Image: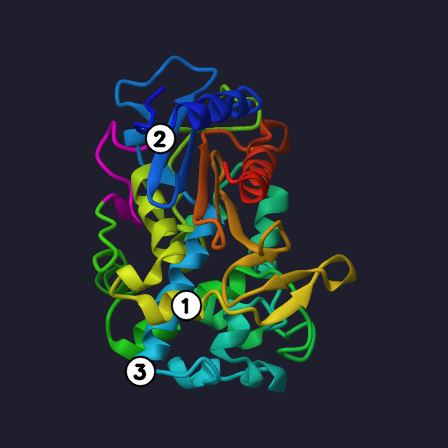
Amino acid sequence: MPTAPGEPALAYRLADALTLIDAPDVVLAVTRQGHRTVVSGGTALAPPTPRPALRYELGSLSKTFTVLLLADLAVNGELSLDDPLTARLPRLPLYHPRSGRITLRHLATHTSGLPRVPTDLLLTALVRPYDNGYARYDTERLLRTFARTRPRHRPGTRWHYSNFGVSLLDPALSHTTGVAYPDLLTARVLKPLGLTGTTLAPGATGTDAIGHRANGSTPVRSTDMGAFAAAGAVRATPDDLLRYVEAHLFPESTPLSAALRAVQVPLLRRGWRHRNTHTLTWYQHPAPRGPLCFHVGATFGQQAFLGYHPASGTGVVALATRRGRTCRMITTAYELLYALAGDGG
């Protein structure tokens, strides 16, 4: 159970939280004003590579990296958030007029009207629930599907979470810059922030955490996201995620300060009584001494949480190698962040 020097009380607090999470491998990490505390454990035997040194699948937390890339291109004048999506793609024969009104901002904020996943992918999942349909879904197919998909509502009028929508940022940004999305993300986000342990592809044997199904014992192969990479393909070490959250807490210390500030600006309200806010990429909830921001993600065998409270300079990272609500990782991590925001740690 590694801990940061000078943080014994917080380490014990994280160790207690760790006991609430049921997963083969778990990492909980907190950064407070730049001081880090990391604990790890799990129900499985410790792997040969220490858990905090492994790379974990982030699932939908990947969206925050993609939208930060989008924001960086926007603040540098290479595109506008309000550009129509179709203006940033190869020419497509659209079947529905509403599709032409979708902007890049709509994709980032889940207000495009596009469904969560394409209908054909959903049907595959219903027929073969343990099959990874993403892996065989290429960019050409994604664009064809977009061209014939009718948005459920007028773009910009309602919030509806969409992996489909965020995935379209991949071909849009690649077409705009002439650089493939993985290379673009690496050059514009990962390298400037010093995220050397973050990638979109599996690493060498022993460097990546192994996911498990809901039973906590059945291993799951590494998740190939195909054309949905922008929505869920990023993998990162806990150390890199701490560095990433610290960049959001203290943007002026990074080369991406303008983009990091831009992705934290509240844009729309949602949830019960509209108490919760959505920025360009983060969920924003009320908390003591100011709002907190967070995002979660899951693949077929892993879960991830990242959240931060700007007012106290606090960030929380949580990772687990099990998929399922009974794991309790997301709830535990969120409650930890909320408590730290209120009591000063």
In-front residue for pair 97/197:
197
Disc 2 to disc 3, C-alpha distance? 36 Å
Q: Which residues are magenta?
A: 197-208
The reply to whether dot 1 and dot 2 touch (C-beta < 8 Å) is: no
Residue 268 in the image: state x and y as whole percent: 63, 70
* Chain-order first, disc 1 or disc 3: 3
**Residue 304 position (above or below residue 168):** above
- Which residue is nearer to you in this view: 167 or 76? 76
Question: Please, what secondary structure does the residue beneath circle 1 have?
Answer: helix
In the figure, 108 relative to 91: above or below? above
- Tell me the tag on residue 261: 1
Residue 26, percent from left and from top: 44, 26
Label placed on residue 78: 3
Q: Please give the name of the residue rendered at 56% of the width and 69% of the height, measured from the top-left corner.
A: 266
Q: Disc 1 and disc 2: Cα gap in Å? A: 31 Å
**Residue 26 seen anywhere in this rendered image of the structure:** no
Identity of the residue furthest to the right in this view: 273
Three-letter code, disc 3: Glu
> Residue 248, position in %: x, y?
39, 57
Q: Is residue 200 visible?
A: yes
